[in-house]
Image (cartoon, coloured by chain):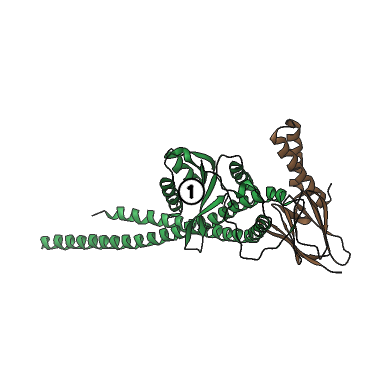
Amino acid sequence: MKTIKVSVVTPDGPVYESDVEMVSTKAQSGELGILPGHIPMVAPLAIGVVRLKKSGGKEPDLVAVSGGFLEVRPDKVTILAQAAEKAEDIDVERALRAKERAEQRMRDQKAEHTDFRRAELALQRAVNRLTVTGKQ
Amino acid sequence: MASLRDIKNSINSTKKMSQITKAMEMTSAAKWNRGVMNAKAFVPYMEKIQEVTVAVAMGSNGINHPMLQSRPVKKTGYIVMTSDRGLAGAFNSNVIRRVFQTIQSRHKSKEEYSIIAIGRVARDFFVKRGINVDLEIIGVSDQPSFESVKDITSSTVGMFSDGTFDELYLYYTHYKSAITQEVTEKKLLPLTDLSTSSKLTSYEFEPSAEEILDVLLPQYAESLIYGALLDSKASEHAARMTAMRNATDNAKEMIKNYSLIYNRARQAAITQEIAEIVGGAAALE
């Protein structure tokens, strides 16, 4: 089966680089799957998991992404994220702590407050990381 | 002439000082190395986001986004990047001098501009001169992660969006090599001079170009600030390393001179003693 190059780039350096059969992610407008030969496209991503299906029917690689962009070119898919981690690089302890902290803050704040929104995003990021590691 | 003991003291204290400057040179060298590596790691992200931004902004005609348009300038913001500590040669004063001169030539009243100071040296300088400092950030780590400066970058970009500033300039030290760093002025917002060398790809937009620009442009501007910060950090450590190496060399030179004076004085003392003994013996005969 045909494959396409994928790289996940963050400000702190490249995180993931490989040839895959399919990329599936969550864009802001909904789930999105990219196969080789896709037309050039740009889409903003939501906080979520990027699944990268490798050839040979193995388990897909998972990368946790906190927002950013997906850029598709005929020969390459680039994911530009402000933060991204592979499953094995995630600090579970830290994510759990972040989750508790965010939940605590959401209990303390009123829903209209900007801090509430911030806490909500933090919670999403923490849960997302935990999902990727399979601890949730 | 200074006494023997005074000279000995000077030699000792200069030796101690040279040990300190030597140690500072070593730590700066290590930080400089990591700083350059960080700046390099950031390049792929920056290039890519620039490419996409340009492609989206140029590729779709008739798009008006507030960040792309110049508006009448009522207030200008200057982001100034310096270090928190001194002892880095002319690193801080170069940046500050450039900003100060620009401000004086461009503006007549203090209402027309204000400063966003990153680093203690810049903050102290402008506060002391009664210039408005809207935002100050102190204690940025030597290896700032994107996450840790997110607050700084997003509040700065936010100040442009909410109309606090109509223009934003960025002043930082660009790292060229270990011995040359250059003060650089960059117009951050509005983004009027987007251009690229690589050829443009025309994209499909999901959901629409406008909505993508809404997310993309602030992130692009934030990346520019972050990139400048990494650049500035690498320059700071390179500057401090050079300054400390010069200090160590100067200390060695001083020790050499002092030792010469010390030995001469010691010899003079011995000669005098011999002369006295000989004189005393001669008087007895």
Label 1: how many Cα within 10 Å (few below 14, some 14–19, many 20+): few
* Relative height, residue A58 to residue B1 (above, below): below
Please state the total of marks drawn on the protein image: 1
Q: Nearer the viewer, residue A69 or B72?
A: B72
Q: Residue B150, percent across and down?
A: 64, 46
Provide the chain ID for the residue under circle 1: B
For this orientation, the residue located farthest to the bottom is A1
Q: Residue B8, percent across and down?
A: 33, 56
Kind of residue at disc 1 = Arg
Residue A52 appears in the picture as rendered: no
Q: Residue B186, percent across and down?
A: 52, 54
For this orientation, the residue located farthest to the front is B62
Query: Which chain identifier belongs to the brown chain?
Result: A
Residue identified by numbered label 1: B85
Q: Quadrant of the C terminus of chain B?
A: bottom left
Quick check: B162 left or right of A37? left
Quick check: B245 left or right of A93? left
Q: Residue B22, percent across and down?
A: 46, 59
Label 1: which secondary element: loop
Q: Quadrant of residue B246?
A: bottom left
Residue A88 appears in the picture as rendered: yes
* Relative height, residue A91 to residue B270 (above, below): above
Q: Quadrant of the N terminus of chain B?
A: bottom left
Quick check: A27 left or right of B260? right
Q: Nearer the viewer, residue B269 or B70?
A: B70
* Relative height, residue B64 to residue B47 (above, below): above
For this orientation, the residue located farthest to the right is A57
* Relative height, residue A52 to residue B80 (above, below): below
Chain B is shown in which shade? green
Quick check: A1 left or right of B66? right
- Residue at 34% x, 53% y is B9
